[in-house]
Image (cartoon, grey):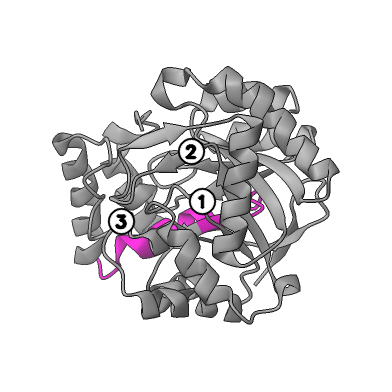
Amino acid sequence: MRYNQLGKTGYEISALSFGASSLGGVFHEIDEGKAIKAVHVALEFGINYIDVAPAYGGTKAETVLGKALKGIPRSSFYLSTKVGKNTSSDGYGVDSFDYSSEGIRRSLDASAKRIGVDYFDIVHLHDIEYNNRVNTDWALNEGMKTLFDLKQEGRIGAVGIGMYPVDLWERVLQEGLIDVGLSHNLYCLNDTRLLPLLELAKSKGIGLINASPFASGLLTSRGAPGWHPATRAQRRIFEKAATYCIAHGVEIEKLAIQFSSQHPDLITTMFSSSNPETVRRNVEWSSMPIDEKLLEAVLNILTPVSNQNWNY
């Protein structure tokens, strides 16, 4: 496992990182025992950065992660969670937002209790663009100030944002508002809009995390969950790409993790899985040479959905 500096945080994090959203059952039902083992396998392979959020499965992901991390030395991993967004226990789709100082502090205390920790290396403001950006200014003012206050108090190590829109990333990075950014679905087989942002982030000393190499499930044999905004016609294009890969003896997941993790400018690529064998497979695949001919063919298939802006 390679390790890279995350901006100016001083954190040296693994080139692959573990997103705990799957532990909340947001993609499909989970076996809790296997989900806990998935975290252990990730750590055994040298992954040292784990991200979670109370919104994943209505706090379920944080609860399961807490069970997985019980007894593991806190100094052996970096941990982040998110604040500002809550999701009902039935998964994605019913969200409420609170970027107030009181709400953020209450959320952080609850997350710490669920996971069994008293310190977070990074805390991200979560999905500040949702609901047509009605909460964006609230998040970037009161929310951001609260996180920097918590950093000053020694409760957290670094301030971040986890979101999607490229134009909002450009604004936040240009203004140098954060220590760390967690972007999703912006560097995968069907989208490479992260690359210009990486240059901007580097110029500002901001560590940018690349998440969702499987395009929130679109780049998998299973396909994306029902909450994903892709249309039926768009899903068929991804299904065609997956079928093409199988016909050539490769699962599309292998190509996806290779593509999203092997760019030399990436600090880390974050994937999520509640299956220990899938975690093992992803780590092993990420270090294998990519099949350039297969990659070219799959990129051609995905051209109609290339750099598509999804309305999450």
Q: Do the CB atoms of the residues marked 1 and 3 lie less than 8 Å apart?
A: no
Q: Do the CB atoms of the residues marked 2 and 1 lie less than 8 Å apart?
A: yes
The disc placed on residue 174 is none
Inspect the magenta stretch and tell me whether residue 227 lies in it.
no
| Residue 128 vertical placement versus 288 (above, below) | above
Residue 195 in sight: yes
Label 3 crowding class (10 Å Cα cut-off): few <14, some 14-19, many 20+? Answer: many
211 or 74: nearer the viewer: 74
Does residue 236 appear left or right of residue 294 in this picture?
left
| Residue 196 vertical placement versus 36 (above, below) | above
For the residue labelled by badge 1, is the local secondary structure a helix, a strand or a loop?
loop
Label 2 crowding class (10 Å Cα cut-off): few <14, some 14-19, many 20+? Answer: many
Inspect the magenta stretch and tell me whether residue 264 lies in it.
yes
Query: x, y percentage for residue 126?
Result: 53, 38
In the rendered image, which residue does mark 2 sit on?
85
In the rendered image, which residue does mark 3 sit on?
27
The disc placed on residue 53 is 1
284 or 185: nearer the viewer: 185
Q: Quadrant of the N terminus?
A: bottom right
Q: Quadrant of residue 46?
A: bottom right
- Type of amino acid under label 3: Phe
Highlighted magenta segment, given as a residue range:
248-270
